[in-house]
């Protein structure tokens, strides 16, 4: 078995065994800054849907379809026509203007950087990687090499056998990529690999002496007024290129509008028009509608998309002069899933907006605005009917109020037996190499009439405010990286009439939600954790972006499956995604 496969398996088994601490072979250094939330410079003009030839009723139906679909799990949605935002919705607890992880959506921005670099004469699409990075080729890898070019990286046709799963073997990804085997003649087949995007970033850094993020900031982000944006670097200081970027939804729309307007922004040519034309046409057959330069062709002819794992999309329809932007947290992968189906049903090949303004429909617009307010949590929730006492066995209809719960819990602390569960969803831990030290203690308090749950995790204490009518927002630190969370609580009873506190802890800058349920006994708590998305995607997500799953092709996994042990693999994964721990009341 290759060493890289072994590293992947080691990480997988450590996760399934619920080991804590820095269990990856990749060094972790805090990078992510605190999100400030200043006003967005150069915002889009707002307009009514009808003024841009779209009916408010149609927009409302689309948002309702997103909200009501059991799998879509939308976070943000923005619709633009003729360069104006005609509808925007942040599905609570997600908030307008908050940046969000992009996952592979940011590959398209890497493609923009390559276009600029080619235009500036730094390299050509036919330049060979071996000529750019000879220092990273191991001696035994120098014989019988196949020539990989910039174009092959751009179009995902390099065939290099060094993907996300193998990158976890250590810090030096350039050497790993340059010394890996090439599975087929470059340019002859399409195979999605986020490390192709990473190497494009590495090429730009090699040629300019600055990171690709810095390069784009001066040439694209600053001119477009994109100020609050962050892109992770690898342990060797190279912008990741294929993942790890946080950007505001409206700013992501600006990058969509930039290509829709053939590289122009407010009359100034930012990206060469010729590059936009080349990048947005089919360059490789991906078994769907085609792949361009780090972006996907869409079902609607002429359409294309910036697409990321779990439903991060900016979809551009030039024929309708429209942009559909969405952030979500679901099973969506590479243009497949309910989110994409809904988007195409309402805005795809069967939709034809008016070329002229429609008559204003006041009633329909008010209904749309009312629905958006409801989804954003700006409408007051109805009364919660709660009755009952504490810890005693009771009928399921006799559930205690939040005030009663806080009165009983205030000052209680529980020491956890295993101490292996983390507040950060497992998928996020893997993607950011920020692994949990394990929750060793859980305490409860009341602050300003609001329930506060304190999670003791390593050297950090996470103060988590809990809202019962709507999510309460807190900011926590995970090994020096700040994250905003929105936490909503609910009180229930289980089949044994135990009181249960159910917490949905939404990481509102991410695509994932951590779910933690506390089952209360007389002097113990049982803590059960889960996350969304969950075990149905973990085998893919373990490999950074999940866009190129090799898990079931690994020799050891093949052997386990051949021996009838697939259930054991699934059980191990479920154990990692659904950990359980017992806490004992600490008596003062």
Image (tube, rainbow, N blue to C red):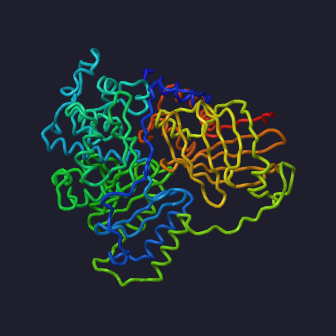
Q: Is residue 509 above or below residue 23?
A: below
- Give the farthest residue toward the right: 393
Q: Residue at x 35, y 46 (%)?
A: 106
Q: Residue at x 41, y 28 (%)?
A: 166
Q: Nearer the viewer, residue 88 or 150?
A: 88
Q: Position of residue 5 (x, y in %)?
A: 45, 25
Residue 202 visible: yes
Quadrant in which the N terminus is drawn: top left
Q: Nearer the viewer, residue 62 or 564?
A: 62
Q: Residue at x 72, y 65 (%)?
A: 384
Residue 564 visible: no
Q: Position of residue 574 (x, y in %)?
A: 62, 38
Residue 423 falls in which quadrant of the image?
top right
Q: Position of residue 347 (x, y in %)?
A: 38, 67
Quadrant in which the C terminus is drawn: top right
- Give the farthest residue toward the bottom: 359
Q: Is residue 121 above or below residue 264?
A: above
Direction from residue 203 to residue 323 in the image, left or right: right
Q: Position of residue 503 (x, y in %)?
A: 65, 50
Direction from residue 124 to residue 519 in the image, left or right: right
- Give the farthest residue toward the left: 121
- Give the farthest residue toward the top: 139
Q: Is residue 344 above or below residue 227?
A: below
Give the mark count: 0
Q: Residue at x 45, y 78 (%)?
A: 365
């Amino acid at each position: 078995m290759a060493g890289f496969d072994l590293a992947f398996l080691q990480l997988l088994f450590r996760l399934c065994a619920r080991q804590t601490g820095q269990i990856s072979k990749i060094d972790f250094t805090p990078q992510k800054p605190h999100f400030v939330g200043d006003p967005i410079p150069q915002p889009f003009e707002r307009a009514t849907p009808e003024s841009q030839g779209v009916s408010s009723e149609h927009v409302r139906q689309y948002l309702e379809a997103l909200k009501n679909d059991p799998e879509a799990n939308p976070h943000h949605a923005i619709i633009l026509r003729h360069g104006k935002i005609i509808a925007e919705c942040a599905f609570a607890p997600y908030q307008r203007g908050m940046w969000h992880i992009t996952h592979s959506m940011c590959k398209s921005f890497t493609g923009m950087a390559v276009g600029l670099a080619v235009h500036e004469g730094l390299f050509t699409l036919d330049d060979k990687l071996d000529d750019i990075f000879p220092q990273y080729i191991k001696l035994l890898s120098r014989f019988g090499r196949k020539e990989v070019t910039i174009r092959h990286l751009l179009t995902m046709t390099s065939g290099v056998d060094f993907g996300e799963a193998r990158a976890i073997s250590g810090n030096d990804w350039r050497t790993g990529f340059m010394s890996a085997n090439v599975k087929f003649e470059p340019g002859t087949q399409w195979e999605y690999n986020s490390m192709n995007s990473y190497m494009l970033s590495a090429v730009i850094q090699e040629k300019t002496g600055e990171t690709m993020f810095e390069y784009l900031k001066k040439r694209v982000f600053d001119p477009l007024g994109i100020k609050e944006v962050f892109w992770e670097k690898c342990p060797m200081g190279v912008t990741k290129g294929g993942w790890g970027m946080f950007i505001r939804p409206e700013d992501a729309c600006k990058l969509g509008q930039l290509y829709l307007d053939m590289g122009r922004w407010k009359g100034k040519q930012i990206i060469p028009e010729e590059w936009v034309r080349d990048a947005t046409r089919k360059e490789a057959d991906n078994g769907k509608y085609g792949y361009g330069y780090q972006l996907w062709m869409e079902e609607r002819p002429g359409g294309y998309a910036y697409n990321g794992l779990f439903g991060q999309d900016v979809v551009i329809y030039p024929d309708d002069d429209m942009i559909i932007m969405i952030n979500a947290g679901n099973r969506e992968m590479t243009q497949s899933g309910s989110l994409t189906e809904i988007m195409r049903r309402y805005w795809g090949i069967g939709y034809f907006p008016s070329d002229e303004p429609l008559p204003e429909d006041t009633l329909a617009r008010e209904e749309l605005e009312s629905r958006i307010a409801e989804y954003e949590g700006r409408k007051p929730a109805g009364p919660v009917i709660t009755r009952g006492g504490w810890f005693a066995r009771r009928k399921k209809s006799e559930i205690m109020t939040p005030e009663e719960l806080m009165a009983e819990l205030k000052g209680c602390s529980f020491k956890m037996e295993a101490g292996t569960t983390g507040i950060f969803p497992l998928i996020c831990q893997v993607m950011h190499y920020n692994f949990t030290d394990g929750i060793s203690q859980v305490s409860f308090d009341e602050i300003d009439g609001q329930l506060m749950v304190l999670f003791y995790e390593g050297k950090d204490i996470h103060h988590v405010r809990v809202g019962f009518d709507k999510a309460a927002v807190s900011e926590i630190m995970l090994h020096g990286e700040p994250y905003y969370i929105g936490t909503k609580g609910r009180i229930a009873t289980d089949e044994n009439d135990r009181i249960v506190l159910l917490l949905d802890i939404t990481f509102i800058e991410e695509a994932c939600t951590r779910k933690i349920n506390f089952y209360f006994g007389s002097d113990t708590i049982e803590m059960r954790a889960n996350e969304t998305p969950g075990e149905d995607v973990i085998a893919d997500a373990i490999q950074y972006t999940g866009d190129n799953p090799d898990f079931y092709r690994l020799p050891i996994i093949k052997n386990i499956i051949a021996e009838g042990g697939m259930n054991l693999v699934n059980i191990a994964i479920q154990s990692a995604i659904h950990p359980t721990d017992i806490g004992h009341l600490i008596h003062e």
